[in-house]
Amino acid sequence: MSTDADYTLQPVPKDKRKGLLSMFMIMLGFTFFSASMWTGQKLAEGMDLNGFLWALLLGGLILSAYTGALGYIGANSGMTLDMLSRRSFGQKGSWLPSAMIAFTQIGWFGVGIAMFAIPVVTQILHLEATPDSMPWEGYAIVGLAGLLMTATAYFGIKSLAIISYIAVPSVAILGTVAMVMAVQQGEGSLASRFAIGTKDMTLFSGIGLVIGSFVSGGTSTPNFTRFAGSKWAGLWVTVVAFLLGNSLMFFFGAISSIYVGGNDIFEVMINLGLFYAALIVLGLNIWTTNDNAIYTSGLGLSNIFGLPKRIMVLVAGGIGTLLAVWLYWNFCDWLNILNCTLPPLGAILILDYFLGKRERKTVQVNWCCVIGVIAGAIIANIVSWGIASINGMAVAALCYLADQLIFNKTK
């Protein structure tokens, strides 16, 4: 019988944990995602340099606190997000969090593939790609990219680490070089370039964009930090990776927008004549997040259907690849759904891990946790005031705490 090297259904043993550098590379690669560059572009359009920096700092600290808490829990327990969900939501109740995280990460995976294929088609092959038309070359690239990215997730955490060791320094160095070249060849200082435009975005809105940029994907943090050597390693590699990795992506997107007018660092590199570097950065940047996303999807689907994680990774990768082009052109709607559904789940997992007192082993469904996630998602979607993800987490937390008070009184 083969050994499950990814410990899908049991905590990761202490002697199978990874070193600090490996964990840092995995988590930093996770946060290197081209979609965050779009957020940087939006921030640059709506804020001056001072507002941009404050939004990055404050939003990054909130996002890092949320993911850091989940990183600590994952490393301390050695459990996947789905195993933790069983403790909080019950054996069958955990199917809801698993379905939510699995299908949303399949969506991110599909978007990521198309974010690689479509720029290659338009910028390198000089073909037209629109919501209504995609050349066959584009579909071929989508298929090849989906196959390669699914393969690394199929082989598990070791493959994720190898790709991260290659991608993280490559993206960081080449991307930074391109960003500096763009500033040097452009006109005006950073402050003067940021000052151009309407600048009608409030600091509150900017913070919300920073948090929302990766709060959904960050909910799956325990799936990776469970391999950390200690609970504090799981906490700090997550906090530093989200602060550093996300901020770098925001800067890439912002600089692209204010100096070149493109959507991301890929277009900057093409315009600077860095053809091969652009292709490497785009591919590796997306790959490191996509294999993490489809790995998470495989774990979630495995919890629901009881099939091996590797089989579920292939299923999830196939679905994400087939839907990739559609997801790309409908990304904004998908992003709004993601930002409103997963944070309430993470809030309940955090609270239950530190405060939960119920006897979980006999619980099939913890309805209060289920209701908390659903109510949090609804409120986050319909309430326009504040930050959607935080609104959702607050409602879910209130539902959970109310249940704890009632349970303790009636125990």
Image: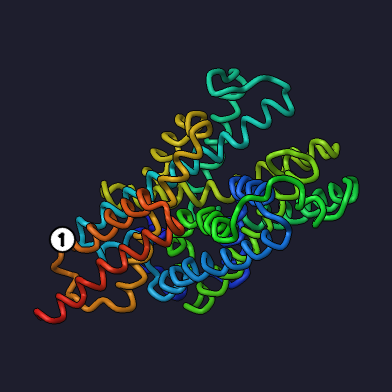
Model colouring = rainbow
Left or right: where 199 falls relative to 17: right
Q: Quadrant location of residue 388?
A: bottom left
Check the image and report above or below for 129 versus 111: above
Residue in the picture at 31% in, 63% down: 395
Could one spot residue 342 in this view of the protein?
yes
Check the image and report above or below for 195 versus 262: below
- Front residue of 74/134: it is 134
- Front residue of 194/294: it is 194
Looking at the rendered image, the quarter that the C terminus falls into is bottom left
* Circle 1: residue type: Gln
Q: What secondary structure is marked by label 1?
A: loop
- x, y (%) of residue 221? 46, 62
Badge 1 crowding class, 10 Å Cα cut-off, few under 14, some 14 to 19, many 20 or more, is some
Q: Quadrant location of residue 410?
A: bottom left
- Front residue of 207/163: it is 207
Residue in the picture at 37% in, 49% down: 381
Left or right: where 379 falls relative to 199: left
- Front residue of 344/49: it is 49
- x, y (%) of residue 358? 19, 75
* Numbered circles on residues, count: 1
Residue in the picture at 17% in, 60% down: 365
Could one spot residue 308 in this view of the protein?
no
- x, y (%) of residue 73? 41, 72
- x, y (%) of residue 332? 50, 39
Looking at the rendered image, the quarter that the N terminus falls into is bottom left
Check the image and report above or below for 243 versus 45: below
Give the residue number, with chain letter if any, for mark 1.
Answer: 364
Left or right: where 264 falls relative to 381: right
